[in-house]
Amino acid sequence: MLYNEPMNYRRCGRSGVLLPEISLGLWHNFGGVDKREQNVAIIGRAMELGICHFDLADNYGPPPGSAEERFGDLLKHEFAGHRDEMFIATKAGHLMWPGPYGDWGSRKHLISGLDQSLRRMKLDYVDVFYHHRPDPDTPIEETVEALVQIVRSGKALYIGLSKYPPAAFNRACTLLAEAHVPCLLHQFRYNLLDRSCEAGMLPAARSQSTGSIVFSPLAQGMLTGKYLNSPTLPADSRAERSDSIFLDAAKVAADADKVARLQNIANEAGIPLTQLALRWLLQRQGVTSVLIGARTVAQLEDCAAAAGQPALSDELMELLNAE
């Protein structure tokens, strides 16, 4: 059943890890409010397409924790025996329980958070564990010591950092390297509407020889073109969801002109806008994998089709880079 279709894999920094060009994130589509049978179909099809990297966090859902619970249930019942074919990531660092220990980057929070994640997913270990966001108050030495302890305890094989600004990222990478637990991956937002990482985070990841996995590659769906030429938001769109924290009607309107120009470029090139946006990212220097979300098998297949494609022409890349 698995790996029936080819997928390109890229080496993650200087490690032995290969990641698929397209990875699957389980945020906002695999929670307790989502249909289990749809989740089964998406995971199964992802594996057939060679998408073996599944990205979670303790606060994914909704409600928080439910994405890990759902994934653990699917792994136990539908995909038992396939654990070693999967590269599973989770994170801690956002608010998960009340009181002083349920958030941020203390040793107490990170180790307790991962222990809870492992129980929800019914796993002995994850492949990579991220600190989900930098903590402005906890000394970075304490956070790194906790991450090192986690690897040495066998609860995670590798360590990643998420949304770290360059200075904090470089410091954390230095401390991890000194402890002989190098940072494997840096995760940050990157898409044709938000290229802010190019000024700091992407060069930092290259300089540290870590992998880079980028999230929100389609700008929460805006780079699919679904919001163009519509007086109202589609009823099933992310922008219309009451729990959408990064996208709403005002954000859609603010970027509408730029999305329209990108759609025209895609039309001229004869490439669907979704795939053009993903292929542009895969052609950016330093990007290891692009993290997509999918509510349906069709959306998954549409995104996966961007992998393994010929390089976009220099002229097309110049047009996209100029936007």
Image: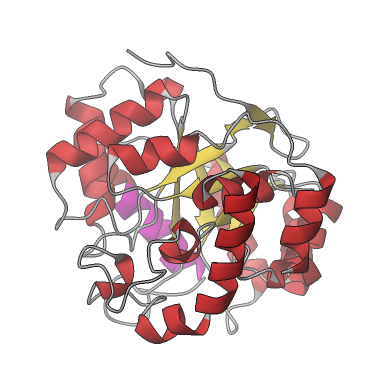
The residue shown at (75%, 57%) is 173
Whether residue 108 is in magenta: the answer is: yes
Task: Judge left or right: residue 124 versus residue 224.
Answer: left
Instruction: Locate the C terminus and report the quarter of the image it occupies.
Output: bottom right
Q: Is residue 123 above or below residue 193?
A: above
Looking at the image, can residue 314 be seen? Answer: yes
The residue shown at (35%, 58%) is 58
Magenta: main secondary structure: helix
Q: Position of residue 121 (x, y in %)?
A: 28, 42
Task: Judge left or right: residue 271 versus residue 316.
Answer: left
Magenta-colored span: 106-117
Q: Is residue 257 above or below residue 178?
A: below
The residue shown at (26%, 74%) is 240
Whether residue 187 is in magenta: the answer is: no
Task: Judge left or right: residue 62 versus residue 206.
Answer: left
Q: Is residue 125 above or below residue 105?
A: above
Looking at the image, can residue 213 be seen? Answer: no
Q: Position of residue 319 (x, y in %)?
A: 76, 59
Q: Position of residue 141 (x, y in %)?
A: 68, 68
**Nearest the eye: 139 or 188:** 188
Q: How is the image coloured?
A: secondary structure
> Number of labelled discs?
0
Task: Judge left or right: residue 296 versus residue 4.
Answer: left
Instruction: Locate the N terminus and report the quarter of the image it occupies.
Output: top left
**Nearest the eye: 251 or 108:** 251
**Nearest the eye: 229 or 172:** 229
Q: Position of residue 222 (x, y in %)?
A: 45, 66
Q: Residue furthest front?
A: 268
The residue shown at (64%, 76%) is 139
